[in-house]
Amino acid sequence: MQYRGSCHCGKVAYQVEGEIQEAFSCNCSLCSRRGGLLWFAPRDHFKLLSGQDDLTSYTFNKHVIQHQFCKHCGVQSFALGQDPRGNKMAAINIRCLEGFEFDRVPVKHIDGRAF
C-alpha cells in the first residue's frame, strides 16, 4: 500500500510504501512530549516529494535518528535513522498520513527512556 503524508502546513510532503500492521508509542523524552505514533519503513520505500529546504533536523541522546521538523509549522511527520542491524529506515508518524485511520492500528509501547 502507498501512503502520502505531510506536515500541518503542507510544505513538507512525502510518500511511503508498505503495510502498517502496528504502530509504536515511545516514552522517551522527545516522543512523550510530541505524542506521535511511529511506523518504520525501509528508507528506499520513502520518498520526499516536497519541502527539503523547509526541514530542520534535531538529534539527541545517541544521535542516530534525525528527527525532521517543518521550519514553518513545527510538525515532525517523519524521522530518518537506522535499525539496530544498520538498515536505513524512515520512522513515519502515522498521525500525519492522509486519510489513514490510525486509531485502528494496534499500538505497541516502547520503553525509550531505557535506551
Image (cartoon, grey):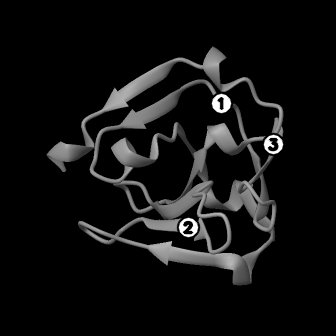
**Which badge, 3 or 1, is on the more N-terminal residue?**
3
Neighbour tally class for label 3: few under 14, some 14-19, many 20 plus, Cα within 10 Å: some
Q: Position of residue 36 (x, y in %)?
A: 51, 41
Cα separation, mark 2 vs mark 3, equals 18 Å
Q: Which residue is mark 2?
A: 68
Q: Residue at x 70, y 78 (%)?
A: 54
The answer to whether 57 appears left or right of 32 in the picture is right
The residue nearer to you, when weighing 80 against 53, is: 53
Say if 56 sits above or below 48 in the image.
below
**Which badge, 1 or 2, is on the more N-terminal residue?**
1
Q: Residue at x 24, y 36 (%)?
A: 111
User: How many tags in the picture?
Assistant: 3
Task: Tell me the kind of residue under disc 2.
Answer: Gln
Task: Tell me the kind of residue under disc 3.
Answer: Tyr
Of tags 2 and 3, which is closer to the observer?
2
Q: Position of residue 68 (x, y in %)?
A: 55, 67
Q: Which residue is mark 1?
A: 20
The answer to whether 58 appears left or right of 51 in the picture is left
**Which badge, 2 or 3, is on the more N-terminal residue?**
3
Q: Which residue is mark 3?
A: 3
